[in-house]
Amino acid sequence: MHDAARGMNVHLSSTDTQQRLRPDPRRGRSIRAAIRAVFNLFAIAAAMAVLIAAASAQQLRTDTTPFRGSTDLVTVGVTVAAKQHQFVTDLTASDFAVYEDGKLQQIFAFASGATVGPPLHVGVLLDVSGSQLADLEFTQNAVIKFLKALPDAADVAFIDFATEVRGGHYTPSDFPRLFKRVRDLRASGETALFDAIGMYLDGAAGQDGRKVMVLYTDGADTASSLSLRTLMRMLKASDVTVYTIGALDNQPQSTQTMLRALLGDIAASTGGAAFFPSSAKQLTKIYDQVLGEVRAQYTIGYVSTNEVADGGWRKVDVRITRADARRLDVRARKGYYAPSAH
């Protein structure tokens, strides 16, 4: 995971570069109050290209405010679907309007899943608690197949969790070692679900580009030091799109209802989606659906017109400007925390 991750005790194992990590619940107070997302070199090139195109083709609104650099970009992942969850993948920057606290913003950078865009960083979180004993083989095979479908990912942060949470960082050339790690997993212990998510968010905060997290669990949190309230604030402050998969068929009905709501809230707070297969045997199909979501996602970057560094919450509203906008479903994160001068 990222060397600058906050609130973690890190110990490298003697046989691998994976990290054995225990989150510190105080990290929720140390997470940056705002996500000043960066596109890396792509952002500058894409932004300039889009602005040039705007002048000639009127794809974007013109603005006399000078471009202040990629570090000022607020990035938003956006998914657009029509009826029956059919993804709309042919939109351009001029088809979107972004509002921050009700004020229209100018789009400076734009990319779709079908084009070359900012680097893709993927987090895969896998529940290996004791309740996974019967289904672990299915979950292992499904995760490996999903990872094999991500050759364009810049890297993968893989985290498995039970009573303890363990994380490792892998580039595509490391995937054979990652696959072996997944196959060697054994199920035991409780479920530190919140700590696992928090650990990933800590590491992702230092990454530049597009960030997607995919979580699989089959039970409720029973072992985390991180509170749900702190976790939800961390999710709102991040620029990660989260997809949750809950295989809850072995849980009591009352627990299933609670977990469906929880996993749904975690995903919705980031503009992601929640999936609930009826059994672990359906995981491959669900991971394919998640992959489709990732491929269909747009990335929009804008420079906020609000330059006040007050650390406050800023509401973001992404809309479609096409005539058929009412028939389209738009999912994006709901806002971010502004930078703080303190």
Image: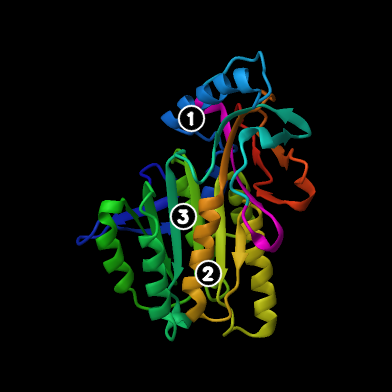
Q: Could you say where residue 237 lies in the image, as x and y percent from the top left? A: 60, 44
Query: On the rendered image, what quadrant is the C terminus found in?
Result: top right
Q: Is residue 48 visible?
A: yes
Q: Residue at x 44, y 31 (%)?
A: 42
Which callout, 2 or 3, points to the residue nearer the camera? 2
Q: Could you say where residue 277 lies in the image, as x and y percent from the top left? A: 57, 76
Q: Residue at x 52, y 53 (%)?
A: 294
**Residue bearing the label numbered 3:** 199
Q: Quadrant of residue 304?
A: top right
Q: Earlier in the sequence, mark 2 or mark 1?
A: 1
Residue numbers of the magenta segment: 70-87
Dot 2: element = helix
Give, as a three-letter code, the residue at label 2.
Answer: Ile
**Residue bearing the label numbered 2:** 286
Q: Nearer the viewer, residue 289 or 66?
A: 289
Contact flag, marks 2 and 3 (Cβ < 8 Å) = no
Q: Residue at x 41, y 64 (%)?
A: 146
Q: Nearer the viewer, residue 43 or 130?
A: 43
Horizontal side of residue 123 vs 276, given as left or right? left
